[in-house]
Amino acid sequence: MVLLQLADWFHAQGYHVAAAFFYDRDGLAEKWQERYSFPVVDLQAWKKGPAVLKPLWLVRGILRLFLLIRRERFSAVMAFTHHSNLLALPLAWLAGIPVRVASHRGRILGFPRWQERLHAWMVNSRMATCLVAVSEQVRAESIEEGVRPAKIRVIPNGVSLTTVKKAERQRLRREAGVQPKGYLIVSAGRLWPEKGHIHLVRAMPMVAEQLPRAVLAIAGDGVLRPELEAEAQALGVAGYIRFLGVRSDVRAWFAAADLFVLPSNSEGMPMALLEAMGMGAPVVATRVGGVPELVRDGETGKLVPPQNPSALAEAIVSLLRDKAERARLAQNGQIYVMKYYSVEKMYERYMRLLVPAAFEVNGE
């Protein structure tokens, strides 16, 4: 989301932009291309099939990226994951691209130590101009992995906010099956192990027992959806949970929610959390990654330990029963996000990084 948002902004400023993906995991490239006026390129470096062919597909994808970089004569290349850092930035260096920016957006669970060391070596080398960390915690993690502090720039994610009419909020609550005087809990993110949705599902029996009119709506899709649905069925809470799939109106769901919950096991600077707070939803989140920089426990939201369904359920029930406290946390959170995490601040920081010549004119 941040990648496409940035590309769209730079394109609107008159820059020639392309967004390239090594593979279209969720089959969204065509939809993205319809939405955006800059090229969205699927390099097709991975797909399902015989294992013996996968190295050939990877080589083909890398070659396609190199040819794209050489043909379009870009002045800057920015990679958005550890794997794309490792694959794309050496190509950009070989192609003579002046600015080559790596990203660290949160520790990858299960990332092999040898790849972590290789990644740190590559970032520290001349192949990378610098590495962007999306939070101070992610900066610390980068240093732990071996990246030199001098190579790191901290640029938090930013959000732009929209207004959602009361009628739309009410419509979404009806769609979720929330009864009058009921509660709508919303969570959003890829249904992936790092996002911790299994712990939220396991918290729901305790929530439903105390607040039988509470409904949980989870926006997003991924490989764990069948497992999560089966767990909800086994725990007897399938009737309390709505799996929304991929939604384009997720901000409206945040605005309609009585509570937003982020149950992640690992995070950098989660966009869903930023947007939920910006849209005025009170939040319960796990104390991981850069989350405590956003959610100050008892000030801008409520923090709980990760992988702890009981603590999650207790925090959810406590806030849903206290309307005044929800309103206080929601207001504080919204003000905090608007002050420190605006999308305009993010754009300016990336502009200074990717187009330094634009600021050299004024001697900045």
Image (tube, grey):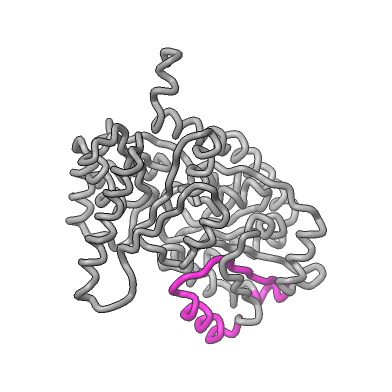
Question: Which residue lies at the image location 42% right of the left edge and 43% below the top edge?
Answer: 134
In the image, residue 336 lies at what x, y percent?
60, 38
* Residue range of the region highlighted in magenta in the rendering: 208-237
- State the residue lying farthest toward the front: 71
In terms of image quadrants, where is residue 205? bottom right
Magenta span has 225? yes
The residue nearer to you, when weighing 1 against 335, is 1
In the image, residue 86 lies at what x, y percent?
25, 50
Query: Can residue 291 be seen in this snapshot?
Result: no
- State the residue lying farthest toward the top: 363
Q: Is residue 23 left or right of residue 340?
A: left
Quarter of the rendering occupied by the C terminus: top left
In the image, residue 115 lies at what x, y percent?
21, 55
In the image, residue 321 lies at what x, y percent?
71, 62
Magenta span has 281? no
The residue nearer to you, when weighing 12 against 322, is 12
Q: Is residue 304 left or right of residue 327?
A: left
Residue 342's place in the image compared with 188, above or below, is above
Question: Which residue lies at the image location 47% right of the left edge and 61% below the top edge?
Answer: 29
In terms of image quadrants, where is residue 272? bottom right
Question: Which residue lies at the image location 18% right of the left edge and 44% below the top edge?
Answer: 121
